[in-house]
Image (cartoon, rainbow, N blue to C red):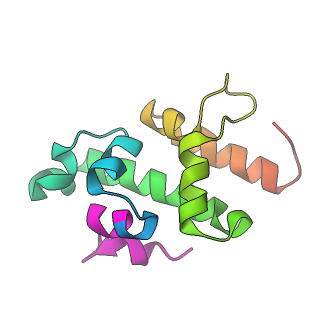
Amino acid sequence: MDLGRYADDGWFAPAKIAEMFRTSSEEVARSAGLGRDAVQRRDRVRSVRTQRRLREMVEIVNKVRPRFGSDLVAFAWYRSEPLAGFSGRTAMQLVREGRAEEVLDYVDAVDAGIHA
């Protein structure tokens, strides 16, 4: 898992994430459950909450990337594919609800052949 490609100087960088996912920083913020301000102001980008949400989103997308073959398709899955056992919620919706760990556990279970 090469999370460094999403970071600058040890901080998750919304602009780099947006470039990898071929979208805007504002869309990255929305996908992580953050306001636009959180990815535009340097002090907000480096806040614990912003960095945690960006890390959670990137970890999930990075974890499913091998099954889809690209960051772009993995990001589309993150945003739009309803997950079994989560009342039709997507990974993005669950991250926005603070349930990223459950998404990571779900991905691990699916990878292990245990279908949720």
- Seen at 45% across and 34% down, the residue is 98
Where residue 80 appears, x then y in whole percent? 58, 41
Q: Is residue 23 left or right of residue 50?
A: right
Taking the view exactly as shown, the residue that stands out farthest to the right is 113
Where residue 97 appears, x then y in whole percent? 45, 29
- The image quadrant that residue 16 belongs to is bottom left
- The image quadrant that residue 111 belongs to is bottom right
Q: Is residue 52 left or right of residue 74?
A: left
Chain part drawn in magenta: 1-18
- Seen at 33% across and 72% down, the residue is 7
Whether residue 6 is in magenta: the answer is yes
Is 15 placed above or below 32 here? below
- The image quadrant that residue 10 belongs to is bottom left
Quarter of the image that includes the N terminus: bottom right
Quarter of the image that includes the C terminus: top right
Whether residue 108 is in magenta: the answer is no
Residue 32 in view, yes or no: no
- Seen at 71% across and 43% down, the residue is 106
Where residue 9 appears, x then y in whole percent? 24, 77
